Amino acid sequence: MKLDQLQYVVTDAPDDQDHNDSKTSREVPPPKTYAEMYLKVGDKIPIETIHNHHRPSMRLPAKIIGWLEGNSLLLEIPLKAAKTGLVRLNEQVLLRAFNGQNAFAFSATVIKIEQFPFTYLHLSFPKKISALEVRTSIRQQVSIPVTLTIEGMGDVSGHIQDLNMTGACVSTPIPLADESAIRFTLHFDLHGVAFSLKLESHLRSTKTIQEKDGTIHHQSGLEFQNLEPNDRLMLSSLLWKEMQTQSGHNV
């Protein structure tokens, strides 16, 4: 087993470049070993159960507590999840992780559930790992309706046009106030499971766009604030979904 501290990397904030300059993240060669993902003891790595005719997909919080290369991965889970049967022996689960640069996904089988001295799982060791490079300075084009809550302005409806790990570009019918503190919630689903991600941000840039039909809207660059490790993981999952969807893969 390997011990280390949780680490996350934050790089560039979004600017007001034209959308034509934005690029999507790219698939990278999958790691040959688990160790090449550079995950650490203490990293949060949510478990997603796979939808079947017995029950819908569910998402559970988990934390890496150790592993033995080629044999088993150990994850701590809430006691309630084990006692209520949310995770079952011999069940296949999906795991997603983000190491600050790349997003990974792999499946595993629950081979043992332990409840002493705390609740944790023995999972089969991943045999196949998918990887995508999530470069925070490169933005993924999206189209997500959103309601912004802005200090001094109340609620403003808008549309997120691109997104990365540190910020977003949002289009609104009215200009946003300089240095505004802005809160909003992203709603999305993965494998039929609905997620909500509450985000805080600050306005970094703004410009006015006039379309050919005379319609005017305002593009604003937002920088995320006070992101928690789980927020980063959920953002990487959302970006993964958008990348796969736009490349024609099912998510």
Image (cartoon, grey):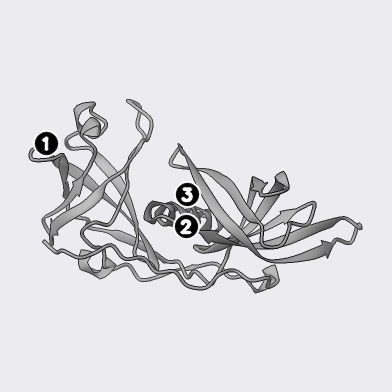
Q: Are marks 3 and 2 in contact (CB under 8 Å)?
A: no
Secondary element at image label 2: loop
Secondary element at image label 1: loop
Crowdedness near tag 1: few (<14), some (14–19) or many (≥20) residues, C-alpha within 10 Å: some
Residue in the image at 49% along x and 46% along y: 197
Image quadrant in which you'd find residue 131: bottom left
Residue on which the image places disc 3: 250
Q: How many marks?
A: 3
Residue on which the image places disc 2: 226
In the picture, measured across the screen, residue 107 lies left or right of residue 57, that is: left
Tell me how far mark 1 sits from mark 3, CA to CA. Answer: 36 Å
Residue on which the image places disc 1: 115
- Quadrant location of the N terminus? bottom left
Q: Nearer the viewer, residue 30 or 143?
A: 143
**First in sequence: mark 2 or mark 1?**
1
Tell me how far mark 2 sits from mark 1, CA to CA. Answer: 34 Å
Crowdedness near tag 3: few (<14), some (14–19) or many (≥20) residues, C-alpha within 10 Å: few
Q: Eyeballing the image, is 25 above or below 146?
A: below
Find residue 18 and report its horizontal and vertical position in percent: 70, 71
Tell me how far mark 3 sits from mark 2, CA to CA. Answer: 32 Å
